[in-house]
Amino acid sequence: MLEEAIYILKMIEEKGYKAYIVGGFVRNYLLGIESNDIDITTNATPKELREIFKKVIILSDDYGSITVMKKNVRFEITTFRKEYKYLDNRRPEKIEYIDSLEEDLKRRDFTINTICMDSKGEIIDYLNAKEDLNKKIIKTVGNANDRFEEDSLRMLRALRFSTSLNFSLSDEVINAILEKKHLLKKLSYHRKKEELDKIFTSDRALEGIKLLIDLGLDKELELKNLNKVKCTDSLIGVWAILDVIDIYPFSNHEKDMIESVQKALQINNKDPYNLYKYGLYINSVAGLIKGIPKKEIAKSYVELPITKRSDLQISSEEIMKELNKEPGPYLKNIYEEIEKEVLYKRLENKKEDILKFCKERYN
Ligand code: ATP
Ligand code: MG
C-alpha cells in the first residue's frame, strides 16, 4: 500500500507540486496498524489533480478533494487549505487553497492526525505529534472548545479514535466535550451515524459505548437504549437494540433487517418455524444478543426439512386441482399450514402426503 502511495506522491511531485501522505495512514503506520485507505495532502488544486490523474479512475471530486483508485487502494487527495468560519458548527463557510503544509495541518482535528510522510518515506511532524502518539493521547490541534464549536463531529471522532486505538482523551478534550456536547443535536444524523458505526464495529466497541454514556452523549445523540447494548458482535443487532430507525438514516434493506431482528428477539430462535420465517442470519443475530450459541441455532437450522416455499414438493396448480378450486387468498393459508406441518415434521414433504393433507383439511 505504501508503495502505491509513494507512486501517487511522485506523480504529483513530477508536475512540480508538493504532496504528502497524512492522517490515518501515517498514524496507523507508526502504530503498526493496517489502513483501508490513504489521505494525501498537496498544494495542487483539484483542477490540477484531475489533469495529473487523467488515466486513473476518479471516483469523486468535491469539497476540493478528489478520490482516486489505484491497484485497489483508495486515495483521497486534498488541496492544502485554510477554513473560515463554520456554519451550523459543521461546514466551513469558505475554504481557501494555500501553499503551506504547516498551515494546512493546523486546520486538522487531532495532533495524531497531522503526521505526514513524504515520497522518500520520511516522517514530517510539525506539531510534535509523535509524542502524543507515543503517549496514546488524543489532543485537538489548538483549543478544544473552539475546535468542537467549529465542527461538533470532532467530538465523536475523538471518541471513535479513543475507542479504536485504545487512546485516552486529554483532560482538555473531555472538558470541551462536556461543554459542547449539546452541539451534537444540530449535526446531521448521517454524519453522526457514520462515526457511531465505526465505534460500534470497533474491537473495543463496549468501551466506546461506556465512554459515550459516561460523557452523557447518549442523550445528545438520542440513544436512550445505549446502556442496554451488551453485545456488539453484530452492527444490525446493536441498531436493533437502539431502536432509532425513525430518526437515524438506514437503507430499506437495513430497516427490514433491524425490524426482523427486533421481532426475532421476542421469539424462540431455535424453533423450526421461526428459523424458516426469519432465516438463519436474523435468528443468529438475535441469538447473539440473547447469548444463545450460534452453533445451536445453526444445528436447528440445518435440520429444517425445508428452508423456502419452493422446497415444498407441491405447486399451487396441484393444490387447486386437488381441491377443485380457482386461485384465491385461501392458497396463502394452505401454504402456511403445509409449511408448519412439514417444519414440525407432522407431515412429510411428499406430493401424495401433502395432497392428502389438503384434501382432509380443506374439502
Ligand atoms: P481513518 O482511519 O478513519 O481513515 P483518518 O484520520 O484518516 O482516519 P479521515 O476521515 O480519513 O480520518 O480524514 C483524514 C484526515 O483529515 C484526518 O486524519 C484529519 O487530519 C482530517 N480531518 C478529517 N475530518 C476532520 C474534521 N472533521 N475536522 C478536522 N480535520 C479533519
Ligand atoms: Mg483516512
Image (tube, rainbow, N blue to C red):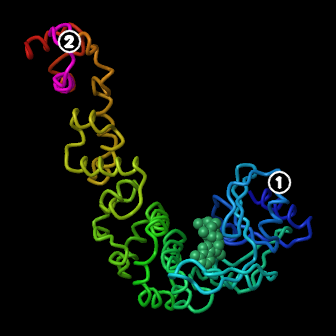
Query: Residue 343 — which label?
Result: none
Residue 111 in the image: x percent, y percent? 64, 82
The answer to whether residue 134 of the structure is visible from this angle is: no
| Local crowd size for mark 1, using a 10 Å CA cut-off: few (<14), some (14–19), many (≥20) | few
Q: Is residue 206 above or below residue 70?
A: below
* Nearer to us in this view, 324 or 115: 324
Quadrant of the rendered image holding ligand 2: bottom right
**In the image, what residue type sits under mark 1?**
Lys
Quick check: 243 left or right of 164?
left
Query: Is residue 272 shown left or right of residue 155?
Result: left
Q: Quadrant of residue 281?
A: top left
Per the rendered image, the range of residues in magenta is: 320-339
User: Could you tell me which quadrant the C terminus lies in?
Assistant: top left
Q: Quadrant of residue 82?
A: bottom right
Quadrant of the image containing the N terminus: bottom right
Front-most of 230 and 181? 181
On screen, residue 319 above or below 201: above
Tell me the tag on residue 54: 1
- Quarter-of-image position of residue 146: bottom right
Reply yes or no: does residue 27 show up in magenta.
no
The image shows residue 266, relative to residue 357, as above or below, that is: below
Which residue type does callout 2 highlight? Answer: Met
| Mark closest to the chain's N terminus, 2 or 1 | 1
The secondary structure that most of the magenta stretch takes on is helix
| Number of numbered discs visible in the structure rendering | 2
In the shown orientation, is residue 8 left or right of residue 287?
Answer: right
Q: Which residue is mark 2?
A: 320
